[in-house]
Image: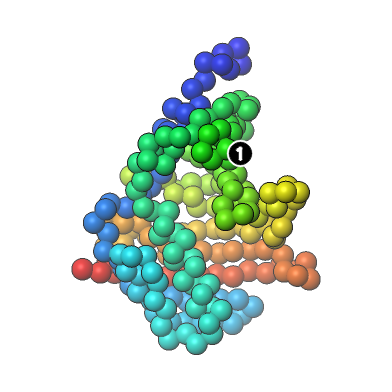
Amino acid sequence: MDNLKKINCKEIFRKAYERRYTWRNDFKGYQGKCIFLRNNIIHEGSFVLGKDFKPNIQKIEDENIVKSIASQLFEVCIHRVKREFESVHSENNFNLLKNSESGILMNVSGKNQGDKYRVKNDCIDMVYRKIHGSIIEIFVEEFLDTGMGFLSKKYSSQQIDPNTLKAKSQKLEYEDEFVNIDKKDYWILSSRTIKYLNQNQEKETQKFVFKDTCLLN
C-alpha cells in the first residue's frame, strides 16, 4: 500500500486488455440453429452470422424475438474483434482510485474521461463506461480461460443515468456458455441465460441456445 504511486495503471490495464479472448482476422462467420426460451414458451429457428457480423435469423416470425436473438449474436461477436490497445486507448490515461482485495480500481482521463475499470488477477472484472448517452456498469464474477484469452462467463449489467447516477434499467444477470467451434480456436456462444426482475418485480428468465454450429467457408 505504501507504493500506490508506483502502480502503473495503464500497463496493468493494457496487460488485462490484451488477455481478453478475440478471434483471428480471417473470421468468415458461422451458422446454426437458434432456440429462444421464456415462460415455458420455445421458439426455434436458424441463423447465419456473416463476417460483417450482421445476423440473419430465419424460421421465427415474432419480430421482437428475432431482434433479441440477433442482438445477442451481434453483441457477442463485436467483442471478439481484435483491436490493438494503442488504437483504442492511446489518448487515455489511467489513474488509480483504489487498490484492495477486490482489485485495482482506476478511472480514465483523456478521450474517455469518466470511464472506470477494475482489474483483478490480470482480468478486467468491472467496466463503467459511457455508451450512447448511458452509463453501462458491468461486474464479472467468472471467466472462461480458452487458452488463447479470457471470456466473461458470469456477470451482471445495468444502465445508469449519467446525470443522476441512478439506475435507469433493471439489473441483468448473465450466464454464458461457449464451445470451440470445429476445434479451430473460434470460441462461440452456445447458450446465454439472462435473469432479471420484470415490471411486476417478479423473477424472469430468458435463455438463448445456439447449436449445430459450423463455420462458413
The reply, left or right, for residue 51 in relation to residue 195 is left
- Can you say whether 12 is above or below 45 in the image? above
Q: Name the quarter where the C terminus is drawn.
A: bottom left
Q: Residue at x 27, y 67 (%)?
A: 215
| Residue 200, position as x, y percentages in the image | 78, 71
Element type at mark 1 = loop
Please tell me which residue is depicted at 50% across the width and 30% down the height of the picture: 93
Q: Position of residue 33 (x, y in %)?
A: 39, 76
Tell me if I can see residue 26 in this picture: yes
Decide if residue 19 is in sight here.
no
Query: Which residue is painted at 54% across and 58% down in the image?
Result: 175
Three-letter code for the amino acid on which mark 1 is drawn: Gly
From the viewer's perspective, is residue 2 above or below residue 106? above
Residue 116 relative to residue 10: left or right: right
Residue in the foreground of this view, choosing between 70 and 192:
70
Q: Is residue 145 above or below residue 55?
A: above
Question: Which residue in the protein does label 1 denote?
Answer: 114
The residue at the point 53 percent across, 47 percent down is: 142
> Residue 104: horizontal and vertical position, in percent?
57, 30
Q: Farthest residue toward the right?
A: 200
Q: Is residue 46 left or right of residue 30?
A: right
How many marks are shown on the rendered structure? 1
In what quadrant of the picture does the N terminus appear? top right
> Residue 148 occupies which quadrant of the picture?
top left
